[in-house]
Image: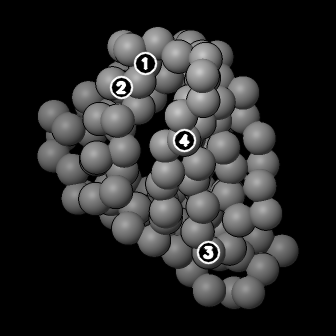
Amino acid sequence: MRTFTRSKSIISAVGESGAPIACDLTALSETERAAQDERTRRMLASRPTLTDTADGLTLTFLENRHIRRDVEDWLALERRCCPFASFDLIDRSTTFILRISGPAGTKDIFRAVFV
């Protein structure tokens, strides 16, 4: 069974293995966190396709230079507060894919962000 908790400074999950993982929300300043929240809102407003994977999830976006820039900027900050996760951008002809993966619990943390 997985558990998921959120506080003002930490988002954490415990996967089926029992090993905890956590995002350190204090890794970003208040200004960076506000910008990150706005980017996330714009990313979601573009209605990406969300797909679960074995070790995380993918979001598929229609190619759009503004959303692409938001995703790239989002990644730069997200790597600071969630170093346990792996992030990849995959280019396709008319879409690009954000792949997020990591240890057990990663999917739960990012699903809470994007769902």
Q: Camera-side residue: 47 or 25?
A: 47
Residue 67 badge: 1
Contact check, label 1 and label 2, Cβ < 8 Å: yes
N-term mark: 1 or 3 = 1
Residue 103 badge: 3
Amino acid type, label 3:
Pro
Amino acid type, label 1:
Ile
Whether residue 98 is situated above or below residue 60 in the rendered picture? below
The residue indicated by pointer 4 is: 90
The residue indicated by pointer 2 is: 70
Q: Secondary structure at mark 1?
A: helix
Q: Position of residue 49 (x, y in %)?
A: 72, 27
N-term mark: 2 or 3 = 2
Residue 45 badge: none
* Left or right placement of residue 61 versus residue 88 in this view: right
N-term mark: 4 or 2 = 2
Q: Position of residue 105 (x, y in %)?
A: 65, 68
Contact check, label 4 and label 3, Cβ < 8 Å: no
Rendered residue at 16%/34% (across/down): 31
Q: Nearer the viewer, mark 1 or mark 3?
A: 1
Callout 2 crowding tier (Cα within 10 Å): few <14, some 14–19, many ≥20: many
Rendered residue at 68%/73% (across/down): 104
| Residue 3 lies in quadrant | bottom right
